[in-house]
Image: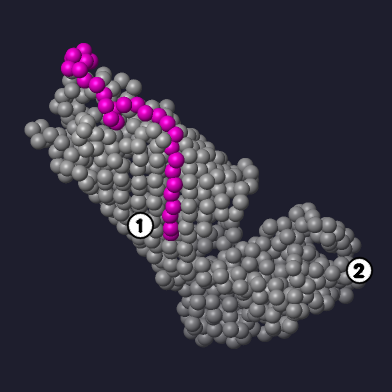
């Protein structure tokens, strides 16, 4: 496929993805203000206007207002926002898949109303506490339904539900009696559904129970027994976000239902919403649960404390070893004599007559190699409110060839930077320093080897923007200064400017497929000529495109495929062809790699890959093919 046509195909595909993704909304800001008479206004700013008011309900113990925004991402860059006025305590923003829940914690329950103002949702809190007897805001979802059933639960069905409430994961806590919803006779259809669902749950078939109950939510939402079983089925089948809605409906009617509150805490814990989970766990502890239950709750609270500590400061390290085979270690052309003759403007016969023989890196080598590497990364959250964090890290890698000692190399890369997370946007500035060491071949024995000792310092600025939970766009601008440390190689010194643009998209599906595309362009400005007489220098321009695809057909096993194309254009005639003073060299490098990465044990991974490289050039000396196959073992700490 031609480069231009490939670029157009990728561009068209990315634009199609972007047009479909940008339809998802996001919460971009959360502010409060007043309009007089003690009314407090909470303004939820969104990227796009809402078509309808979000689903909402309230709780009195503790006092909360809960709103669910479908097809909406959390663009605040944080999950908690504290308030110091207006009778507000804090807001929790929890995103799961394509839905975001906003939980507003109050000092005391107050009457309120919601309205849409352009791309903002306004929540007007009245100055006085809400009258609990009116029930006007107790359970808006249940009250808003047309023809919602109001039936009592028969004694036997009630006993089954109570038994399920008392049998919790790793804990037992007595549930308060379920309130009867009215004096009317029970609906036999509801009773049958509850009995079937309870039997499925007892049989360990939570997913089947959820599939039975979920389609009937519109009919029976507000029935406390139905909501509780729906919550249990959702939680046990891996849908904690759906479970929280059901459990909170239960607690809105009966705040003392300890089993539902404990399960609600577990659901929030599974979602990673630690502040909400902690609040629920601590509320259960105040109700005097049995000692085994209290011990389980305390274990959860310890994990939450560790999570919150890790959120502030993280340190990770790794060690990796690999073994592989390289078919062309020196990236040598198949026709060295013809290639050298070409750059000198001579014929092969003339070169042979001069008794030219390729040596050193001009010769073709292949063979096995082994490698070892390790690294460390440090991240610390400096200011959660403003989303500021600092990072630092380093990697060391060494490769040793079995039969070509001169090509053994050692690499060190160090970095440090600052990141600011602002809603859907993430900004990062990073400073880098790298060292590359390779002894190299002697040009003419017994002279010293022409080594490739290089130090590179750089600075980059990066902007990433997320569109929902499945798409991310990135741009970066980098400056670097590669400096060669020996006199004969200093003509390679340049100052480089590089621009990168990328897009990541995660598809829906059981195999979690994702695609990553990157376009890059760099310009290297040479600091000194390679030929004083002609002024030829090593300045060049590179343009590249990379596509990466990954899918996970089995648990803990990823398959990946990467394709890349890079074009290099020398900015100076005669830079790599001393015998052709007016000739501009051009190269095209094609890369293809595929492999599998599996994680057989916790923190361990095994990766196998095959990388194919084909370099084409208008100077045959620089044309080569290369195959690199390897397998690696990595341990993360």
Vertical side of 418 occupied by 410: above or below? above
27 in relation to 433, above or below = below
Residue that protrudes farthest toward the left in the picture:
533
Residue nearest the viewer, comparing 501 with 204: 204
Q: Residue at x 47, y 64 (%)?
A: 314
Using a 10 Å C-alpha cutoff, classify the residue at mark 1 as few (fewer than 14 neighbours), some (14 to 19) or many (20 or more).
Answer: some
Front position in the image: 290 or 113: 290
Rendered view: 78 above or below 462: below
Q: Which residue is mark 1?
A: 415
Label 2 – label 1 distance at C-alpha: 66 Å
Kindly identify which residue carries mark 2: 156
Report x, y in % for residue 248: 69, 71
Horizontal side of 293 relative to 152 (left or right) equals: left
Instruction: Verify whether residue 373 appears in magenta.
Output: yes
Q: Which residues are magenta?
A: 348-377
Q: Is residue 178 visible?
A: yes
- Where is residue 99, by image quadrant? bottom right
In the image, is residue 255 above or below residue 486? below
Residue 169 position in % (x across, y down)? 75, 66
- For the point 64% across and 67% down, the residue is 268
Q: Secondary structure at mark 2?
A: helix
Number of marks in picture: 2
Give the x, y percent position of residue 29.
46, 67
CB atoms at circles 2 and 1 under 8 Å apart?
Answer: no
Q: Reply yes or no: does residue 580 show up in magenta.
A: no
Residue at 35% in and 55% down? 414
Q: Which element type, helix, strand or loop, lies under badge 1?
A: strand
Q: Position of residue 374 (x, y in %)?
A: 44, 52
In terms of depth relative to the viewer, which is nearer, 11 or 125? 11
């Amino acid at each position: 496929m031609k480069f231009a046509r490939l670029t157009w195909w990728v561009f068209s595909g990315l634009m199609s993805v972007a047009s479909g993704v940008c339809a998802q909304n996001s919460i971009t800001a959360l502010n409060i203000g007043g309009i007089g008479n003690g009314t407090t206004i909470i303004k939820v700013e969104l990227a796009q206007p809402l078509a309808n008011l979000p689903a909402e309900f309230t709780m009195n113990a503790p006092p909360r207002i809960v709103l669910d925004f479908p097809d909406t991402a959390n663009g605040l860059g944080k999950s908690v926002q504290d308030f110091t006025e207006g009778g507000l305590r804090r807001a929790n923003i929890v995103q799961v898949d394509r839905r975001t829940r906003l939980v507003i914690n109050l000092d005391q329950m107050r009457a309120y109303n919601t309205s849409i103002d352009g791309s903002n949702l306004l929540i007007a809190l009245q100055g006085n506490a809400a009258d609990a007897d009116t029930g006007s805001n107790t359970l808006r979802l249940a009250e808003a339904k047309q023809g919602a059933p109001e039936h009592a639960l028969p004694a036997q069905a009630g006993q089954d539900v109570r038994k399920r409430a008392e049998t919790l994961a790793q804990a037992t806590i007595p549930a308060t009696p379920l309130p009867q919803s009215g004096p009317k006779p029970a609906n036999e259809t509801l009773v049958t559904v509850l009995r079937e669902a309870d039997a499925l749950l007892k049989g360990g078939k939570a997913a089947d129970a959820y599939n039975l109950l979920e389609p009937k939510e519109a009919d029976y939402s507000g029935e406390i027994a139905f909501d509780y079983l729906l919550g249990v089925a959702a939680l046990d089948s891996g849908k904690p976000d759906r479970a929280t809605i059901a459990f909170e409906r239960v607690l809105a009617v009966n705040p003392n239902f300890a089993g539902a509150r404990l399960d609600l805490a577990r659901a929030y814990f599974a979602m990673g919403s630690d502040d909400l989970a902690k609040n629920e766990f601590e509320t259960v502890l105040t109700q005097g649960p049995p000692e085994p239950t209290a011990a389980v709750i305390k274990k959860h609270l310890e994990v939450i404390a560790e999570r919150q500590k890790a959120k502030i400061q993280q340190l990770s390290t790794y060690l990796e070893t690999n073994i592989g085979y390289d078919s062309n270690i020196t990236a040598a052309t198949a026709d060295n004599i013809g290639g050298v003759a070409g750059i000198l403007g001579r014929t092969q016969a003339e070169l042979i007559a001069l008794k030219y023989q390729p040596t050193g890196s001009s010769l073709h080598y292949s063979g096995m190699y082994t490698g070892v590497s390790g690294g460390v990364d440090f991240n610390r959250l400096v200011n959660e409110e403003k989303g500021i964090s600092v990072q630092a890290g380093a990697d060391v890698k060494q490769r040793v060839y079995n039969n070509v000692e001169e090509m053994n190399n050692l690499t060190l890369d160090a970095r440090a930077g600052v990141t600011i997370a602002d809603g859907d946007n993430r900004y990062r500035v990073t400073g880098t320093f790298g060292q590359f060491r390779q002894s190299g071949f002697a040009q003419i024995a017994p002279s010293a080897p022409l080594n490739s000792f290089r130090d590179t310092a750089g600075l980059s600025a990066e902007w990433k923007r997320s569109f929902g939970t499945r798409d991310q766009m990135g741009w970066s601008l980098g400056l670097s200064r590669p400096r060669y440390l020996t006199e004969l190689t200093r003509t390679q010194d340049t100052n480089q400017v590089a621009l990168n643009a990328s897009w990541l998209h995660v598809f829906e599906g059981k195999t979690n497929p994702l695609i990553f595309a990157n376009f890059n362009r760099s310009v290297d400005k040479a600091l000194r000529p390679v030929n004083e007489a002609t002024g030829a220098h090593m300045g060049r321009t590179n343009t590249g495109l990379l596509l990466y695809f990954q899918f996970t057909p089995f648990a803990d096993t990823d398959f990946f495929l990467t394709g890349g194309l890079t074009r290099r254009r020398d900015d100076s005639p005669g830079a790599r062809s001393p015998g052709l003073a007016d000739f501009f060299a051009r190269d095209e490098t094609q890369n293809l790699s595929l492999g599998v990465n599996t994680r057989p044990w916790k923190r361990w991974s095994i990766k196998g890959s095959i990388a194919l490289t084909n370099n084409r050039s208008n100077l045959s000396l620089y044309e080569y093919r290369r195959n690199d196959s390897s397998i690696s073992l990595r341990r993360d700490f």
